[in-house]
């Protein structure tokens, strides 16, 4: 049993493990704690999303859907192996599962067959959704599997757990099949290797020095016009999506479009700009607050 990891500590642990981590909207305070207890924590649970596309998958996991409000996990692991943190606290990911399985996780013994749904898993497990259709055909890139390994090892190392504290949703709740496409036994072997010293182990007494972020300076309002093409526009669009202001059907592109204008207008209104100050054309104040990464 363990005390839940704070938002700041989770970010520190994952980045210390060498992971690229994105903070999504208000993830630090986004949870379902009003609906039930959060903790003590006993393990890490791995899922697949049954979706495709990073932006759409992250939005679903943050927002949830009718009948199941978000967050639907604590982090989303995309195909590139990057982590998108969407919640901190109780999340709707595990549901009711087998109490015998929980006892085995606590004791770090062999898992029994899950044949009951009598125990609240949302209270006891960190949950990570991995972007995959879950049809047995959608590939699992090595970068994504390595990220699952690193996320699990970072949390286990912090709590003093072994790889036996990491399970799949299919090992917890009867009728579930996720994650489909690799075996949890194989993943646990990878995690055990990493915990056993075959991968770099961060110093628990030291805090990593975060790299100073580099942002694109405001290019001027005249930069944003029909026909303009630039990686800056793509980067801007991705930031707008991360902030929940994206109005894209196929995702941001390098070419300035009406979707970019509508998305930026939503961002301006988020900042409480009104009238001509919320026309969808970036200004310096709103641009500086958006913090578009330079690379």
Image (cartoon, rainbow, N blue to C red):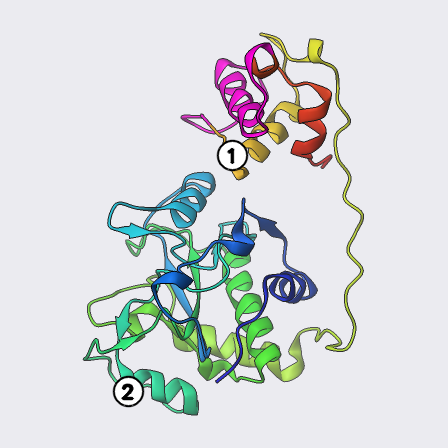
Residue 262 within the magenta-colored segment of the rendering: yes
Query: Is 31 colored magenta in this rendering?
Result: no
The residue stretch that appears in magenta: 247-276
Q: Which mark is residue 253?
A: none
Can residue 253 be seen here? The reply is no
Q: Within 10 Å of the Cα at label 2, are there few (<14), some (14-19), or many (20+) other Cα atoms? A: some
Q: Where does the image place residue 142, in percent across and percent down from the top left?
A: 52, 58
Comes first in the chain, label 1 or label 2? 2
Q: Residue at x 49, y 14 (%)?
A: 258
**Quarter where residue 19 is shown:** bottom right
Classify mark 1: residues with Cα within 10 Å, few (<14), some (14-19) or many (20+): many
Which quadrant of the figure contains the C terminus? Answer: top right
Q: Which mark is residue 241?
A: 1
| CA distance separating discs 1 and 2 | 41 Å
**Residue drawn at 42 percent across, 64 percent down:** 90
Can residue 167 be seen here? The reply is yes
Q: Is residue 208 left or right of residue 122?
A: right
Residue, disc 2: 100
Locate residue 228: give its quadrant: top right
Observer-nearest of 247 and 265: 265
Whether the residues at callouts 1 and 2 have beta carbons within 8 Å, the answer is no
> Residue at (62%, 28%) from the top-left corner?
236
Name the spot of residue 33 as percent of width and height, x first.
41, 63
Q: Secondary structure at mark 2?
A: helix
């Amino acid at each position: 049993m363990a005390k839940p990891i704070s938002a700041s500590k989770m970010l520190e642990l994952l980045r210390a493990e060498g992971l690229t981590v994105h903070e999504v909207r208000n993830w630090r305070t986004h949870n379902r704690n009003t609906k039930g207890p959060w903790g003590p924590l006993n393990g890490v649970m791995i899922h697949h999303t049954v979706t495709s596309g990073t932006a759409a998958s992250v939005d679903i996991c943050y927002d949830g859907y009718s009948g199941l409000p978000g967050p639907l996990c604590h982090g989303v692991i995309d195909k590139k192996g990057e982590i998108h943190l969407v919640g901190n606290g109780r999340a709707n990911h595990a549901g009711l599962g087998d109490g015998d399985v929980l006892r085995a996780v606590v004791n770090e013994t062999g898992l029994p067959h899950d044949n009951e749904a009598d125990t609240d898993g949302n209270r006891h497990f960190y949950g990570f959704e991995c972007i995959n259709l879950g049809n047995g055909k959608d590939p699992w890139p090595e970068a994504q599997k390595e990220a699952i390994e690193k996320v699990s090892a970072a949390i286990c190392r912090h709590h003093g757990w072994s790889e036996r504290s990491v399970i799949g949703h299919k090992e917890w709740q009867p009728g579930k099949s996720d994650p489909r496409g690799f075996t949890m036994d194989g993943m646990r072997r990878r995690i055990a290797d990493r915990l056993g010293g075959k991968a770099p182990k961060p110093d628990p007494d030291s805090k990593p020095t975060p790299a100073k972020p580099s942002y694109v300076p405001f290019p001027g309002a005249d930069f944003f016009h029909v026909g303009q093409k630039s990686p800056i526009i793509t980067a801007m669009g991705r930031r707008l999506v991360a902030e929940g202001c994206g109005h894209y059907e196929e995702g941001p592109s390098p070419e300035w479009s009406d979707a970019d204008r509508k998305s930026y207008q939503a961002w301006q209104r988020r900042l409480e700009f009104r009238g001509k100050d919320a026309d969808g054309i970036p200004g310096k104040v709103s641009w500086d607050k958006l913090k578009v990464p330079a690379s």
